[in-house]
Each structure stands twice: as structure tokens, then as C-alpha cells.
Amino acid sequence: MLCYLAGVVTGCAYFSFKHERNLGLGEIDNEDEDPAANLIGQERETNKLHALFLKIQKSSWAALLAIGGGMTVSQLLVFLWARINSSPKDVHLGLSLFFLMVSRPVFCCTTALALMPFILRAPILAFFSNFLCHNFWFMFARLSYGAYLSSQVFMMFRVFNSERGIWACEIDAFLYYLAYLSLAFLFSFVVTLLVEMPVVNTFKVFILD
């Protein structure tokens, strides 16, 4: 769930960065003719998030710092989660609740920050950006959301219909992971062909056109 939320935060951040210049803040030929020109300039100067994304996009050091800082904070949160779960009585209840309340948004934001240099195609990450932009990943990207939703159903179906207890085994866990992944993408593929694409085409033909 946290990985999905991190993806949502990353997508929203990139959408905001991409369409920042299309929100009515166009270039003005003569600022004296527009009384709001100074206010628009102040808004552009005070948009720190947009400036940060521009810095990550153009500077290799900023991109590396964003990746390193985001991953460091995320791993630190994971370490603290494991520490609190292993010995919950050693941590004050109020502090534990506060950490659980704050840690998830911080984890999503730091993970999104670590992914932004790849999405913004920083110069130092050109190889990885071109690799991820290959047409080979297009089909998996279209099916990923359906696979995310259906994989949990398959896992719960197997767990709740097991007659015996589930024992920890690395080989079984890896094989079941491959089975869940395959079934999830296969189910998503069938649903995309039979439901999603007909609905999208119908919407385009009868509503948009």
C-alpha cells in the first residue's frame, strides 16, 4: 500500500511540475499593461517545490542528493518500524502512535523524492530513463494497476481457504510470489481487453467526439 501511495505522490508531483506553466501564468510582453504582473512574478519566485524540481532536473548533484536523501530517510523509517514492532513495550505509547501517524506520509514523500530524478530525466540518469521509457514496459504499465488490485484477492483467497497453518518457507514464498504475480497480470490483461478498452473506446466515440 505504501508503494502505491508513493507512486500516487510521485505522479501528482510530476503532474504539478509539468503543468505549472499552463495555469494562466503565461509570459507577458509588457508588464506595465498588466497590474497583476508583479503578483504573478512573486508567485513564481515563491514556488519552492517547482524550483526544487527544476534543480533536480538540471543538476546532477541535486539528483544524486535527492536519491540519496530520500532513500536514507526511507530506510531509517523502516529500521524504526522494525525496532518498534520487535519491542513495542520499550517505546512509550504516545511516541509510538505519533511515529505511526507521521511515518507513512514521510515515507511516501521521501520515496517520491528519490524517484523524481528518474521521472524528470536528470542528465546523470539518462541511461536509466531511456531504459524505463522503452516500449517494452508499456504493456506492463497499462496492466500494473489491475495487477495491484487483483493480487491481494488471490493472496487472501489462498490464505483463508487453507486447511492448515502457513509455515514460513523461502522456496514456497518465492514460488507463491511468482504465482500471484502471473495470475494478477493475466487477470488484469483479460479485464483490460474485455472491460477497460471497450469502455474507453465507447467514451471516446460517443462522449469526447
Image (spheres, rainbow, N blue to C red):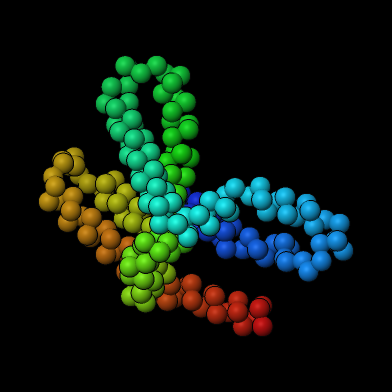
**Left or right: where does residue 182 sit relative to residue 123?**
left
Q: Residue at x 79, y 53 (%)?
A: 38
173 vs 73: above or below: below
Q: Position of residue 136 (x, y in %)?
A: 33, 75
Task: Name the image quarter holding residue 208.
Answer: bottom right
199 vs 159: above or below: below
Give 202 or 123, whichever is nearer the viewer. 123
Give 33 or 185, whichever is nearer the viewer. 33
Q: Position of residue 54 (x, y in %)?
A: 53, 57
Question: In this view of the protein, can residue 187 be seen by the observer?
Answer: no
Q: Residue at x 12, y 51 (%)?
A: 171
Give 187 or 147, whichever is nearer the viewer. 147
118 vs 205: above or below: above
19 vs 9: above or below: below
Question: In this view of the protein, can residue 36 be seen by the observer?
Answer: yes
Q: Residue at x 26, y 51 (%)?
A: 158
